[in-house]
Amino acid sequence: MPETIDFEAPSIPELIEQMKAEAESLDVGDFAKDQEERNLHRYLRRRSQIEAERDRVKELTKAMIASMDSQIAALDYLFMKPAEDTARRLLDGKKVKSIKTPFGTVGFRTNPARLEIIDETKVPWEFVKMSPSIEKAKLNEHFKNTGELPDGCKLTDAEEKFFVK
């Protein structure tokens, strides 16, 4: 059984001090004209390093999860049907519908009857939900070409927004 990893997140003040120390220790070369610009470069460099590491961890995690999902599917392929048969045999004639073991629980659950739609075109109209869908690209193109503000719309002022990439 793989070991678990204990991870204790630092407190907010500890994390702030850690980020400050990491950013201040970065060498950003001689591009900056003054200390403020050097701090900007340090901030952006450290931020991009953390983003790159986060993205790498995400990809590795996805690959690990996909591998584990494949392992589960292989185990289910090999053992689910025999496990179901064993559970049926062990539960035969009993009122309980599940078996608890030290490694998990197996059992049977009755799902209620339900309607399944097999052909949407044949469902009576009173059961069809119609919701409008606005084609924003066409709406924007119309405004751009004519300057006409369509009913139900308003024009907001342009705004400058700070971003970090």
Image (cartoon, grey):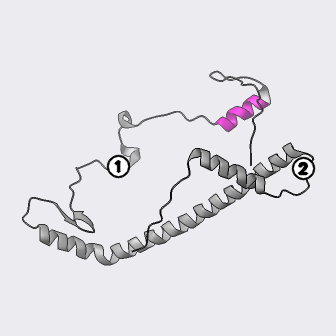
Q: Are marks 1 and 2 in contact (CB under 8 Å)?
A: no
| Label 2 neighbour load within 10 Å: few <14, some 14-19, many 20+ | few
| Label 1 neighbour load within 10 Å: few <14, some 14-19, many 20+ | few
> Which marked residue is nearer to the observer: mark 1 or mark 2?
2
Name the residue nearer the viewer: 154 or 98: 98
Tell me which corner region of the image, top left, top right, bottom left or bottom right, holds residue 156: top right
Q: Which residues are magenta?
A: 136-144
Q: Main secondary structure of the magenta part?
A: helix
Q: Is residue 42 visible?
A: yes
Report the residue marked by disc 2: 32
> Is disc 2 placed on a helix, strand or loop?
loop
Q: Residue furthest left?
A: 93
Report the residue marked by disc 1: 117
Query: Residue 2, percent across and down?
Result: 43, 73
Name the residue nearer the viewer: 27 or 2: 27
Tell me which corner region of the image, top left, top right, bottom left or bottom right, holds residue 63: bottom right
Name the residue nearer the viewer: 2 or 130: 2
Task: Identify the residue shown where x is 49% and y is 66%.
Answer: 65
Which amino acid is tagged 2? Ala
Query: Mark 1 to mark 2: distance in Å?
Result: 64 Å
Which amino acid is tagged 1? Ile
Task: Identify the residue shown where x is 39% and y is 76%.
Answer: 74
Check the image and report above or below for 1 versus 42.
below
Check the image and report above or below for 102 versus 163.
below
> If the image is split into quadrants, where does the N terminus sit?
bottom left
